Amino acid sequence: MLAIYEHGQLLLLDPVKLAEGQEVQITILSERDRVRKILGDLVVQYDEDIAISSDDNIDEDALLAEIHEATKGMPSVSDLIIEERREGP
């Protein structure tokens, strides 16, 4: 759910179906955190302890197949960016 903060109030950008008095939880993200959340599953953390040396052989086809399987059904990064731009700030 997106909202804009103006004059001390959060203005929701989309209608919501809430019961009167229903409690909600709000998380406020910085622009950087928003990007990290969108890309979170695609970002790989580098760990020197388990890093592959340049001497190791990598089965690139198997790696590509694993990535494809893990991201099956997920929108592409470019689709997420386009959707976010359409929604606006």
Image (cartoon, grey):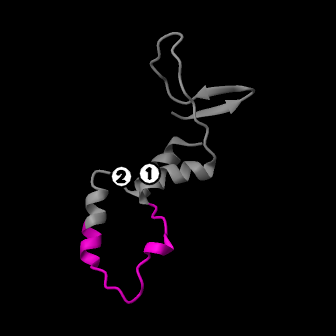
Which residue of the protein is positioned furthest toward the top in this rendering? 20
How many numbered tags mark residues here?
2
Distance from label 2 to label 1 (Cα)? 7 Å
Q: Can you see residue 81?
A: no
Please say if 25 is above or below 80. Answer: above
The location of residue 31, given as percent across then percent down, is 62, 49
Q: Any mark on residue 80, and which?
A: 1
Horizontal and vertical percent for residue 69?
Answer: 25, 59
Q: Amino acid at mark 2?
A: Pro
Helix, strand or loop for the magenta stretch, by majority: loop
In the image, what residue occupies the spot 24% across and 67% down?
A: 65
Mark 2 surroundings within 10 Å by alpha-carbon count, few (fewer than 14), some (14 through 19), many (20 or more) = few
**Residue 17 relative to residue 66: left or right:** right
- Residue 34 inside the magenta-drawn segment: no
- Residue at horizontal 45 percent and vertical 47 percent from the top: 83
Write down the region rendered in magenta.
43-65
Q: Is residue 71 visible?
A: yes
- Amino acid at circle 1: Leu
Q: Are the residues flagged by discs 2 and 1 in contact, CB closer than 8 Å?
A: yes
Say whether residue 63 is magenta.
Answer: yes
Q: Quadrant of residue 52?
A: bottom left
Which mark identifies residue 75?
Answer: 2
**Residue 67 x %, y %:** 31, 64
